[in-house]
Image (spheres, grey):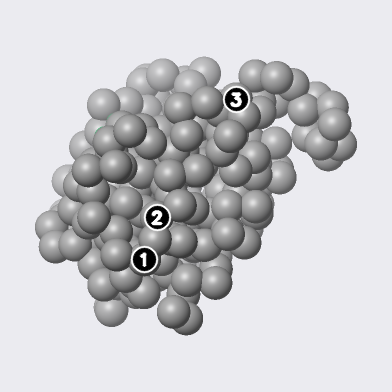
Amino acid sequence: MNTQIWNNYRVERHPVGKGKKGNIFRGYDAINKRDVAIKRMKDIEGARKEAAIMKEYSRHDFLPTYYDFFIDERYAYIVMEWIEGKSMKKNKKKLKSKQALTFTLKILDGLHHLHKSGSVHSDLHRGNIMLLAPNYKSLKIIDFGNGKLIENKAHKYPHDLSWKQVKDQSRDLYRAAALCVYMLTGKRPQNERDIQDITIKNKELRNVLVKALSIEKANRYQTAQEFKQALEPFLNK
Ligand SMILES: Nc1ncnc2c1ncn2[C@@H]1O[C@H](COP(=O)(O)OP(=O)(O)OP(=O)(O)O)[C@@H](O)[C@H]1O
Ligand SMILES: [Mg+2]
């Protein structure tokens, strides 16, 4: 195989993913005997921020695990868990309601953990969600390049959350709700008005999604946990 060596990693020459901010390469960590994904970026400060967010949330089933960070003269490199899977964007079909809800609950679980660690994602869309091989029944949220980490530890005390942080969390939850509607119906609502024209058979489920997509932020679910609790009962209906 055509490989190169970066630090301790043997890395494939061709990137597996090309993004606006950098390229993703598949590599192998011979010391820890594991596959890794390496995000190589020109924006070194941006990469430092992205790595800091991943380091802070540490480990969670629905988020990629952070391993390492290094720089050379030209690039910064974030080393993380290799995720075998495909982008949710490649899934063209709408999903069965149970699968759509299962995915949404996993996304909310991941967001809950991320928010608790003091960060927000800020770029939640299908291209930043990977479905896991071999059966594509679970997922991981990727790409913290637009994320924000609050420096002080005010997030440990919810009443100290800054107004800005609350607003950013609310945006993540809103995007999760829009994704849920897309998975259920194949349609993309911008807000609660659009959802009026979208058919969701279960009226109570529809009400939960209308609330989550409220134009008025104060009317939405305020935390990932709260939104999750509202959705959970529909899994078994
Ligand atoms: N941990 C990983 N394991 C395997 N593949 C990954 C991993 N992280 C990212 N990828 C692949 O690389 C692609 C781009 O990753 P990511 O979204 O993090 O980069 P980006 O530069 O921020 O992209 P964009 O600007 O397009 O959002 C993903 O769609 C996915 O196919
Ligand atoms: Mg991306």
Query: Count the marks: how many?
Result: 3
Instruction: In this rendered view, identify the residue nearer to me: 45 or 235.
Output: 235
Q: Which residue is mark 2?
A: 206
Seen in the image, is 34 located left or right of residue 228?
left
Quarter the C terminus occupies:
bottom left
Mark 3–mark 1 distance (CA, rounded to whole Å): 29 Å
Instruction: In this rendered view, identify the residue nearer to me: 77 or 126.
Output: 126
Residue pictured at 39% horizontal, 61% vertical: 203
Q: Which residue is mark 1?
A: 202
Residue 100 shows in the view: yes
Q: Which residue is mark 3?
A: 167
Residue 165 on image: x %, y %? 66, 25
Residue pictured at 50% horizontal, 43% vertical: 211
Seen in the image, is 132 located left or right of residue 187?
right
Examine the image and state in which quarter residue 200 appears. Answer: bottom left
Vertical position of residue 188 compared to residue 88: above or below: above
Quarter the N terminus occupies:
bottom left
Kind of residue sitting beneath label 1? Asn
**Circles 1 and 2 in contact, beta carbons < 8 Å:** yes
